[in-house]
């Protein structure tokens, strides 16, 4: 009787272990990332520990699953005027961009948004400021005109997040928080406050 009990116990243990292995194997899914997601992560993280124009760049860790999709000069106006999307205007040498991106990406994922569109407009802005490329100057002016708030045409600041739907500007947010400077890193409380701003804008955008 005792031997039978021991055998049953051993068999039960083996079966339980096999079931556990099967569950683990089923849960072991291969995750792949897009070329844009990989490129974006490398583009920003490669500048960790470096300076730009005598300013220490904020170290940044970008999630590989970042939902980033690149936009370029040739299609930025199409997405602003014809698509329902959220677009991040920035570049990796800008500390505001580096500071807010992890929070923005987390908010995008939390709200189950498929793509966060990214437009690096550094070269475009430089052409506009140096007045050396008519086509780029016209494009920059068109973007500024679309992003005007309360009828005022404004310069585009890196770190600006734009929410558009049906060709209309639903909302924008730039920099991080009003009381923080260019070189400020975010505290845990700051991160929660910024996430709340992004989440509210996303909800407003979704409900339009």
Image (cartoon, rainbow, N blue to C red):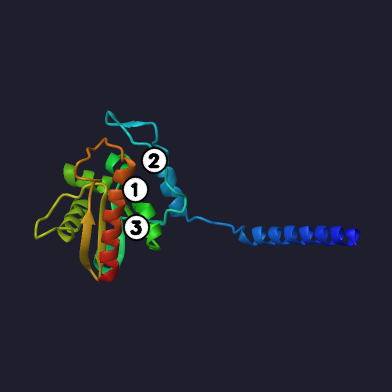
Q: Is residue 154 above or below residue 180?
A: below
- Of all residues, the one furthest to the left in this rendering is 151
Circles 1 and 3 in contact, beta carbons < 8 Å: no
In-image side of 11 versus 102 (left or right): right
Residue, x 31% and y 64% (percent of image)? 85
Circle 1 — which element?
A: helix
Q: Earlier in the sequence, mark 2 or mark 1?
A: 2
From where the camera sits, is residue 64 visible? yes
Circle 3 — which element?
A: strand
- Name the one closer to the observer, 65 or 72: 65
Measured Cα–Cα span from mark 2 to mark 1: 9 Å
From where the camera sits, is residue 71 visible? no
Residue wearing tag 3: 117
How many other residues sit within 10 Å of disc 1, few (<14), some (14-19) or many (≥20)?
Answer: many
Residue wearing tag 2: 60
The picture quadrant where one finds residue 99 is top left
Q: Position of residue 118 (x, y in %)?
A: 33, 54
Circle 2 — which element?
A: loop
Q: Position of residue 134 (x, y in %)?
A: 18, 51
Residue wearing tag 1: 101
Q: Is residue 6 above or below residue 185?
A: below
Circles 2 and 1 in contact, beta carbons < 8 Å: yes
Residue, x 37% and y 31% (percent of image)? 50
Q: Considering the image in quadrants, where does the N terminus appear?
A: bottom right
- Name the one closer to the observer, 33 or 65: 65
């Amino acid at each position: 009787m005792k031997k039978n009990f021991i055998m049953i116990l051993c068999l039960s243990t083996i079966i339980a272990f096999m079931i556990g292995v099967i569950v683990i194997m089923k849960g072991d899914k291969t995750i792949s990332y897009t070329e844009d997601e990989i490129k974006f992560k490398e583009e920003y993280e490669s500048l960790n520990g470096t300076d730009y124009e005598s300013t220490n760049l904020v170290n940044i860790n970008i999630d590989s699953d970042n939902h980033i999709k690149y936009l370029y000069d040739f299609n930025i106006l199409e997405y602003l005027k014809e698509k329902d999307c959220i677009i991040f205007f920035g570049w990796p040498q800008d500390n505001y961009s580096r500071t807010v991106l992890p929070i923005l990406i987390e908010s995008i994922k939390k709200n189950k948004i498929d793509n966060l569109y990214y437009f690096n407009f550094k070269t475009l802005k430089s052409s506009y400021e140096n007045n050396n490329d008519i086509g780029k100057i016209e494009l920059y002016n068109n973007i500024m005109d679309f992003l005007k708030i309360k009828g005022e045409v404004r310069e585009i600041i890196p770190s600006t997040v734009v929410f558009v739907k049906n060709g209309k500007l639903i909302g924008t947010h730039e920099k991080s928080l009003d009381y923080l400077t260019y070189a400020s890193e975010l505290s845990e409380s700051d991160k929660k406050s910024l996430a709340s701003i992004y989440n509210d804008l996303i909800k407003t955008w979704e409900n339009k």
